[in-house]
């Protein structure tokens, strides 16, 4: 693929930043996921696993070029939140703990995600574990992004 960059053509085009709305999933692998309206959150709400069970999982299909990426999730931390395991094509690439003693909006991220082959990938968020003080297994998401860092 070729594209125009500045005053010359290049073969490295796009795939530098992908923003996903959490309701634009490709599959719900486990659990029940719903939109919860709230004026206190980005986009006036968040998508969450209302089934609140260990191993609830939601999948997204995205094209990623070879490179190193950072994943971000705009979320709400609270006592009822899971540790999100991020999977790419079924393999874990990191976790983010969404537990907090009091509720607040936050951006959680995982950096240094290496993509070694370009192509359509399945990005999954899974409630595989939780903080020792967490009371439940909820994952909340108002926005997801992947951006290339190298």
Image: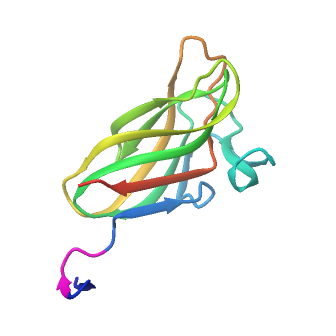
Whole-percent x, y for residue 61 in the image: 44, 60
Name the quadrant containing residue 112. top left
Q: Is residue 140 left or right of residue 17?
A: right
Residue 103 can be seen, yes or no: yes
Q: Quadrant of the N terminus?
A: bottom left
The number of numbered badges drawn on the structure is 0
Q: Where are the magenta residues, as a range?
A: 8-13
Q: Residue furthest top?
A: 132
Position above or below: 57 against 95: below
Seen from the viewer's position, the closer of residues 63 and 56 is 63
Q: Is residue 96 left or right of residue 39?
A: left
Seen from the viewer's position, the closer of residues 52 and 84 is 84
Seen from the viewer's position, the closer of residues 3 and 5 is 5
Name the quadrant containing residue 98. top right
Position above or below: 62 against 107: below
Whole-percent x, y for residue 109 in the image: 44, 40
How is colour applied across the structure in the image?
rainbow
> Is 12 a magenta residue?
yes
Q: Residue at x 59, y 23 (%)?
A: 99
Name the quadrant containing residue 121. bottom left
Whole-percent x, y for residue 50 in the image: 71, 38
Q: Quadrant of the C terminus?
A: bottom left
Seen from the viewer's position, the closer of residues 70 and 127 is 70
> Is 40 a magenta residue?
no
Q: Residue at x 46, y 31 (%)?
A: 96
Q: Residue at x 62, y 17 (%)?
A: 134
Residue 30 can be seen, yes or no: no
């Amino acid at each position: 693929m070729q594209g125009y960059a500045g005053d010359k053509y290049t073969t490295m085009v796009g795939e530098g930043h992908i923003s996903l709305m959490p309701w634009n999933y490709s599959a719900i692998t486990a659990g029940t996921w719903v939109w919860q309206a709230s004026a206190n959150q980005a986009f006036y709400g968040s998508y969450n696993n209302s089934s609140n069970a260990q191993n609830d999982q939601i999948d997204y299909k995205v094209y990623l070029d070879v490179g190193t990426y950072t994943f971000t999730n705009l979320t709400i931390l609270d006592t009822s939140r899971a540790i999100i395991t991020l999977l790419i094509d079924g393999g874990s690439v990191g976790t983010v703990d969404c537990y907090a003693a009091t509720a607040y909006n936050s951006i959680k991220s995982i950096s240094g995600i290496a993509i070694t082959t370009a192509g359509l990938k399945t990005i999954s968020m899974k409630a595989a574990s939780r903080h020792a003080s967490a009371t439940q297994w909820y994952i909340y998401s108002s926005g997801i992004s992947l951006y290339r860092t190298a």
